[in-house]
Image (tube, helix red, strand yellow):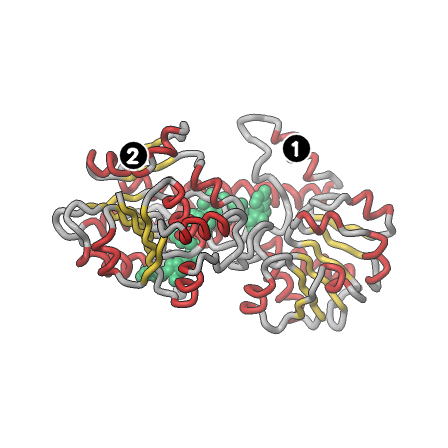
Amino acid sequence: MRVTVVGCGYLGATHAAAMAELGYDVLGVEIDHAKRESLAAGKVPFYEPGLGDLLADHVAAGRLRFTNSFEEAGAFGDVHFVCVGTPQRPDGLGADVRYVDAAVASLAPHLREGALVVGKSTVPVGTAARLAATLPAGTELAWNPEFLREGHAVQDTLRPDRLVLGVASERAERVLRDCYAPVVAAGTPVVVTDFATAELVKVSANAFLATKISFINAVAEVCEAAGADVVALADAIGHDDRIGRKFLNAGVGFGGGCLPKDIRAFLSRAGELGVEDTMSFLRQVDDINLRQRTRVVQIATTMLGGSVARSRIAVWGASFKPHSDDVRDSPALSIAGQLHLRGAMVSVFDPQAMEPARAVFPTLDYAETALAAARDADLLLHLTEWPEFREVDLDVLGSVVRRRQVVDGRNRLDADTWRGAGWTVRALGRS
Ligand SMILES: NC(=O)C1=CN([C@@H]2O[C@H](COP(=O)(O)OP(=O)(O)OC[C@H]3O[C@@H](n4cnc5c(N)ncnc54)[C@H](O)[C@@H]3O)[C@@H](O)[C@H]2O)C=CC1
Ligand SMILES: O=C(O)[C@H]1O[C@H](OP(=O)(O)OP(=O)(O)OC[C@H]2O[C@@H](n3ccc(=O)[nH]c3=O)[C@H](O)[C@@H]2O)[C@H](O)[C@@H](O)[C@@H]1O
């Protein structure tokens, strides 16, 4: 079986390398010249732990190649995974499916008899059925949504919690089961379903995760008002297996290229299907999430005496979460940007996301190290919980800042230790 992967970003590059690791000859199709050149040279154009070695090994072995030719892809592949982006539409809340449409349209005329096109992108329900009708006779479509997390992408791809196969025929199921045979053999549960259910599984999973985070962030605000501690509360309710402790970390909320746009797209699609009311709670999930960013700006303003103008603020973290350099809809950068626009001098440090952050927010100051960002700061904001921020020498840090004030936007700093070192510590949801 020969495999192509169309769209080699965070999802596609990982999927392509993982398919090579499973033993297939893989051809990646990427239209971005710089990205394609980098991948073809065996270099991942973003930060993802473990992916660099995997990609380099399989490129060097000749098992993984890259092209921009759909003709070549069509001639090469038996199975074509479509992994292009589905960002929020510029003119609304829905998902912009133009890249998926374009990828399938470019591939269609070149497909070989018997080829299977497998959508992995996150799409509005109904997309697969619509696209299936555009494929030539003798070829077929399936939808196989992806659940990987950035920062754990390789492991999540090779050892997923489950495989969801949205298929319209037994043959498509058989081809996909063959394709994932080593993964299935390792005990991964397989859910075989229709297109619509497969598409909805994906957005429902992300909507549930987003709801869990906004739930705990709403409770965090009540904790603050009542003098309670949201971290202890989350630990306590998390002991209940039915609830679970994961995704109950209160703080500046969720960002990234998926959760925010996926809940909006789900809401939008529900509206198109005439069932918007039933999903309207997702509006609140979104509002609560965005409110966390505003709350940090308000807390910073209060700590700086009513205005942030002309204050020096250090921001630790720019990526939307640790172990990733992805700054798409990053809460940390959003807060840094808001403070800058209010007149603060903001210095940002992130262990991996400096270049992507600079590209999105060129007007912020970017420091070489966490300590350099904190130099002469009136306030330090801990907004992305990279482990190295918890290992900083507090004596040294205390000697470089102007005022020992910190907001822990992720509830991951040891507040007692920081207070012991003379710091005023504010955290979200803790008195
Ligand atoms: N990033 C993640 O962790 C996950 C993403 N997803 C979903 O996967 C999809 C892709 O997401 P990302 O990889 O994050 O996006 P991305 O923006 O990093 O990658 C998309 C890639 O597709 C390329 N592309 C666009 N049109 C193309 C075309 N016609 N032919 C070939 N290449 C084309 C782009 O140049 C880009 O490199 C989205 O639907 C997303 O919701 C799903 C699970 C995890
Ligand atoms: O569809 C996708 O693209 C992916 O979206 C998320 O993965 P990802 O965006 O990589 O990151 P998460 O680990 O889910 O974190 C998302 C955001 O929530 C925040 N978060 C997470 C957990 C928590 O308890 N609190 C919290 O604020 C993180 O800081 C981050 O900003 C899902 O977890 C994946 O299963 C899914 O495949």
> Element at badge 1?
helix
Tell me where residue 394 appears, x and y as whole percent: 82, 52
- The residue that mark 1 highlights is 235
Q: Is residue 172 visible?
A: yes
Near mark 1 (Cα within 10 A), the count class, few <14, some 14-19 or many ≥20, is: some
- Specify the farthest residue to the left: 137
Residue drawn at the location 13% of the way across and 47% of the way down: 138
Near mark 2 (Cα within 10 A), the count class, few <14, some 14-19 or many ≥20, is: some
Residue drawn at the location 60% of the way across and 57% of the way down: 352
Position of residue 395 in the picture relative to residue 73 (left or right): right
Tell me where residue 304 appears, x and y as whole percent: 78, 63
Give the residue type that dot 2 points to: Arg
Residue 370 occupies quadrant: bottom right
* Number of the label disc, if any, that sits on residue 177: 2
Quadrant of the picture in which ligand 1 is shown? bottom left
Residue 103 occupies quadrant: bottom left
Tell me where residue 411 appears, x and y as whole percent: 69, 45
Residue 96 occupies quadrant: bottom left
* Number of the label disc, if any, that sits on residue 296: none
Give the residue type that dot 1 points to: Asp
Position of residue 21 in the picture relative to residue 133 (left or right): right
- The correct choice, above or below, for 397 with respect to 120 in the image is below
Structural distance between the alpha carbons of marks 2 and 1: 39 Å
Point out the image quarter for the C terminus. Answer: top right
Residue drawn at the location 48% of the way across and 40% of the way down: 155
Q: State which mark lies toward you, 2 or 1.
A: 2
